[in-house]
């Protein structure tokens, strides 16, 4: 069984004059990313690999998740193919994951990340900032992650009303 967590970067700061690629997280993003990382860790444990767009807001989100996931001893894999990626670009990255990896976490951007969830599962999920969608497939091969072949097993949002 392969598990994939698709995550949209946390809320970014639009008040800066930096280019899109270098735009940082804002106050809410800095609050939501660790909160979501802690939730994912508590529910599902630590992934085998984390892959992130190199854009500052996405990579920083991945770093904040990694800290809460106790992933600090591992390297986050930066992949700029995930920046402004189409669903096919994201699926190409997924299908290239080493077969020894059972659980992967991938950080990217909208609209591509939402469209990828739809492509893989035939279910549309509007991926708001810092949202997590868990997708699984009963397979030993990441190559089997293709259009309409996977199932959503969780959808988490920072705005979930948890008591």
Image (spheres, rainbow, N blue to C red):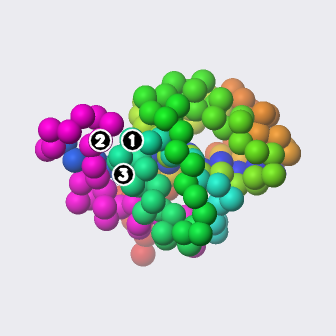
- In the rendered image, residue 66, in percent from the top left (x then y), is placed at 51, 64
Looking at the picture, does residue 156 appear above or below residue 40?
A: above
Q: What residue is at 35 percent from the left and 47 percent from the top?
A: 57
Q: Quadrant of residue 71?
A: bottom right
Question: Mark 3 to mark 2: distance in Å?
Answer: 14 Å
**Disc 1 and disc 3 in contact, CB within 8 angstroms:** no
Label located before the other in sequence (3 or 2) = 3
Pick whichever, 158 or 69, lies toward us: 69
Q: Residues within 10 Å of mark 3 (few under 14, many from 20)?
A: many
Give the structural element (helix, strand or loop) at label 1.
Answer: loop
Looking at the picture, does residue 115 appear above or below residue 43?
A: above
Q: What residue is at 65 percent from the left and 29 percent from the top?
A: 92
- In the rendered image, residue 22, in percent from the top left (x then y), is placed at 29, 41
Question: Residue 95 magenta-drawn?
Answer: no
Location of mark 3 (residue): 10
Is residue 163 in view from this perspective?
yes
Question: Residue 41 magenta-drawn?
Answer: yes
Image: magenta residue range:
15-42
Location of mark 2 (residue): 22
């Amino acid at each position: 069984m392969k598990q994939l967590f698709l995550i949209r970067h946390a809320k970014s700061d639009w008040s800066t004059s930096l280019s899109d690629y270098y735009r940082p997280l804002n106050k809410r993003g800095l609050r939501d990313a660790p909160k979501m990382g802690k939730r994912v860790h508590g529910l599902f444990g630590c992934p085998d690999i984390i892959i992130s767009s190199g854009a500052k807001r996405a990579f920083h989100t991945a770093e904040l998740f990694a800290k809460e996931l106790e992933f600090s001893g591992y390297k986050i894999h930066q992949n700029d193919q995930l920046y402004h990626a189409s669903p096919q670009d994201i699926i190409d990255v997924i299908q290239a994951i080493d077969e020894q990896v059972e659980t992967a976490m991938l950080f990217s951007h909208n609209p591509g990340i939402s469209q990828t969830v739809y492509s893989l599962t035939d279910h549309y999920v509007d991926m708001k900032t810092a949202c997590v969608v868990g997708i699984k497939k009963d397979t030993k091969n990441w190559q089997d992650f293709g259009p309409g072949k996977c199932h959503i097993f969780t959808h988490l949002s920072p705005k979930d009303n948890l008591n």
